[in-house]
Image (spheres, rainbow, N blue to C red):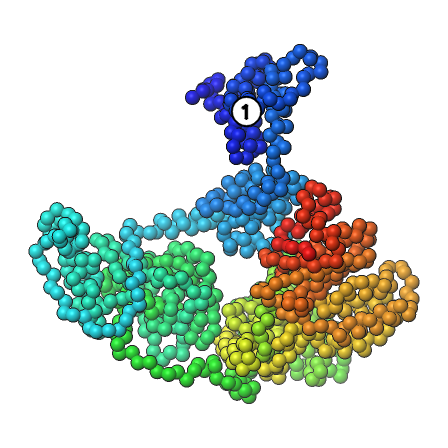
Amino acid sequence: MMAGKGFLPVPRPLELTGDVAENWETFEEDWNSYEIATETSKKTAVIRSATLKTVMGRDCLDILKNLDIPPDPDDADANPLEDPAKIITALDKHFKPLRNTVYERYKFNKCDKAAGEKIEAYVARLRKLISTCDYGDLKDQMLRDRIVLGIRDSKVRMKLLKQRNLTLQAAIDDCKTSETTNQHMKAIQNSTETDHDTVHYARRGAYTPGKARAKKQAVPQTWKTSSAGSCSYCAKKHPPGRDACPAYGKECSACGKPNHFARACKSADQKQPRRMGKAPGQYKKRTAVHAVEDEDHLMTINDERPSPENAYAYGVNANSYAKQVYATMKVEGKSVRFQLDLGATCNVMPRKVLKKHNISYQVDNNQRTLTMYNDTSIKSDGETMLKMINPRTKKNYCAKFVVVDGDSTPLLGSRSIQQMDIVTVHYNKIQVVQSNGSRLDKPITREGLIEEYKDVFTGLGCLPGECHLEVDESIKPRIHPPRRVPVSIKEQLKRALDDMTEEGVIEPVTTPTPWVSSLVTVSKPSGKLRICIDPRDLNVALKRSHYPAPTIDDLTPELRKTKVFSVLDAKNGYWQVVLDEESSLLTTFNTPQGRFKWKRLNFGIKSSPEEFQRRLDQALEGLAGVKPVVDDILVWGEGETLAEATTDHDRNLRTLMQRCRERNLKLNQDKIKLWMQEVPFHGHLITSQGLKLDPGKVAAIAKMPRPTDAQAVQRLIGFVTYLAKFLPKLSDVCEPLRKLTVKDSEFEWLDAHEKILETLKELVSTAPVLKYYDPTEELTLQTDASSTGLGAAIMQNGQPVAYASRALTDSETRYAQIEKEMLGVVFGLERFHQYTYGREVKVQTDHKPLEMIVLKPLHAAPRRLQRMLMRLQQYNVTIA
C-alpha cells in the first residue's frame, strides 16, 4: 500500500460511481488533511499538483485533462495543470453542479434511524445530508423535524411531539437520555439473568377433549440405539452405555417417568388426563404446547398468537368473589403470592409489587387494555418476561406479564396456570350453559340507577391522594383584615360555616398563619350562600402545575358513531380533593366567627381547575364512552341502531357508576341528564347528527342590544368569536366592528354597523350542524383570502367539520394576492393541525396559480413564499 510521510496512507482514488458530488467532497477533505499531515502543502506547486494528480486516480485525471482551465492572466505561459488550486477549483466546478437540490432533500426526508444506530451517528448522518439541501435559516427546524419523524422509538416521538417549543438541541438531548436509559435497563436486566438455557415451545394446537390415553409403555432399562443411530432415550447420538446418555436419571415432562426425555417418550402421543390428587410425575396432561427438554431447561410460556390490544383480567381487585384461590411462586428468586384466575387471558403484575421485591424488569411498547370483571378497563404500562419457579415441581418457567399501575393483585391467567401444572382442567367434563347476560347489559331507569348507586349520590366525595399547593417563597405573605358582612346574611353565614365545618370542608384556625384571605359570599339561585375567598394575593405566590384542560375539540372526534348521551355532574367538584396540612393553612380566611382554613380544594385558587381535572382524569381513566370536562362527565353510546347505542350507553354508564363507587367520587343526582339524543355541554349542543350551537347562546345573540360604546363592541366580538367554528368568514364580517374598538378613535354607530349586527344574528341563527371528525374519511381543506382577512373550513363528505378565520395584520394586508392565498392555506393547515397532521389533505382554493407554485423548486419561489412553503413541508398536501 502506498504511504506518505510518517507512513500515513494516501487518500483513496476518487470514485466516479454513485453520488459523485459527495465522493468528490470526501476526496477533497481527505486531500487537504493529507497535505497538512505530510507537509506537502509546504512544497512547490509543481510537486503538490503532481502528488494530487497521482493520488486522484486515472479516471479522474482523464476528466481533468479534458477540462477547460483558463490560464493565469499574469503568466500566460504557465501550465494550469501544475497549479493545485486551479485543479481543485476546476474539479469543484465540474463535480458540484451534478448535485440536484430536490434529490438531496428527498434523500434527507427519507433518512430514518437504522435499527441499533446510535442517536449521535444518526444526527451526524442527517447533518451531512442536510448540508446540501439549501434550507438556509430553516436548517435547524428541518433537522429537528427529521429527528422526530425518523427515530424508531414511538414513546420518545410522542414525548417530543407534546413539547410546544421543541428545539433541535432539546430533541437530541431527549433522544440521548432515552437511549442511555434503555442501555442501563438492559444492562441491569442482563446482570440479573441466570445461566439457564431458554427452551421455547412450539404451539401444536389448543387442547381438545377426547379419549383417555392408552396404557403407558414401560421404559426399557437397556440402553439401545434406533435404526438411525440415535439413542432411544435422549434422541441424540452418543457413545454406548447409559452413563453417556444425558437422559439417564432425568424425569420425562410428558409422562413423568424417569430415564428419558419427552422427545423420545413412547407415551407422548397418547392422551391421559392427569387425575386430581396424584403426584406431579405420576400423570401428565397434554397441554397446548409441546416441550423440548434438556439437562437444565427453562420452559417459556408464550402463546404464538399476536397479543390483542384488549385482554381480560377478571380477577384483579375482584372483591365480589366469595372464594379466591392463591398460589405462591418464585419470581426472579423472590416469593410472590398470585391469585389464580381461569377466566383471565393474561398474567398481570403490578408495578409496585416488582418494586417491593426489587425485581428488575423492562417493558415493551405493547400497552394493552385490560378488561376487568366489572367491565371496566385499565391501561397497562406494557409487557415483560419474568422467570418463575414452581416450588412444588421445582421446574423453571419464563412467563409474559402485563405490567399495571395501582393497587392490583398479582394474577396468573388460564394458560399459565395449566402449563405450570398448578390446576388441571377436565375439558371432557365441562358443561356449556346459556348465560342470561351480564348485569351491565340489563336495562336501567333513572330511579333504578339512583337507588342502586345511592351511595354515589350521597355524602361528600374524596378522590385518592392529597393535593399540595406550591408557593413561591420569594413573595411576601399577606394578611387581609376581616370584611364587614351585611346584617341580613349574618345568621345565614353562620349556619353555612357550621354546616361546612360539620362536613369537614373547613376547620377553625387558632394558630398564627402567614397567609389570610378575605371572605366572599355569593347567593345561589336556590337562596343558599356560597362561601368563597378572595385569594388574589395568594394566587400571585402560587405555582401552577399546568395540567392541560380538555376542550370540546378534543372530545368531538370520539363522537362520530354516537346516538345516545348522558351528562352527570361531580357534586361539589373541588371539595372532593383533600388538601394536605401545609396547603390547608395557606387558604386561611377571615369571618365574623374567626379564622377558618379549607380542608378541601376551594374555588378561586388558580391551580384548582387543573388539580381537579387531573384527579378526575386519573379516577376515570380507561372507561369507554366516558369523558370528564371540568366537573361535567359526558357518557355516550355507539351503535348502528338506537337500540344498540342505548345498550352500549347503559353499559358505559354502569361502569362509570362502579368506578365512582370505587374511587369515592360523588355525583349530583339533581343535575343528571340521561338518555338524550341532544345534550347541552359547555356552550355547545352535542347531538347524534353532529355538533350544534347551544340554543341558549343563539337566544343571547338574538336579544343582544345595539352596542353603545367600544367596550360593548368588544364584548359582542368576543361572544361571536367563541362560536367562530360555526360561522364562515367571521373575520371579514366583523372587520368594520373592530375599527370601532381602536384606541383613541371616536365611537360612532352607523347604519352599516347596524346591518353587520343583523348579519351576525342571522349567521348565528342559521349556523350549520358540524360533522364529527372521522379519521377514516377523506379530508378537504377549503381556504380563501380577502383584502382584510383569511378563512378556512375543514370538510368531510361535503359537510363542514369546523370553520376558522382571522384578520390580516397591517403588514399582511400589503402582501400580493398569491401570498395572501398561500398564507390562507398555511393558516388553515396550522389552525386545524390536530386534524390535518399525519394524513393526506386535499386543499381546495379558487386561486389557480397556487397549484403551479407548489410544483416549482423551492429556490424558484420568492423568499416570502419560500418561508410559507417550508411551513407546508410537514403536511401531506395536494392543492387543487
Residue located 75% across and 74% down the image: 766
Residue to which mark 1 is pinned: 60
- Where 437 sits versus 193, above or below? below
- Split into 4 quadrants, where in the image is the C terminus? bottom right
Q: Say if residue 312 shows up in the picture.
A: yes
Q: Residue furthest top?
A: 77
Residue 364, quarter of the rendered image: bottom left
- Where 699 sits versus 242, above or below? below
Q: Say if residue 251 shows up in the picture.
A: no
Q: Amino acid at mark 1?
A: Cys
- Where 509 sits versus 393, above or below? below
Question: Looking at the picture, how far across and down is residue 341, in whole percent?
Answer: 35, 72
Question: Looking at the picture, how far across and down is residue 399, in whole percent?
Answer: 34, 61
- Where 805 sits versus 570, above or below? above
Residue located 55% across and 82% down the image: 458
Residue located 56% across and 27% down the image: 28
Task: From the viewer's side, name the closer residue of 244 and 177.
Answer: 244
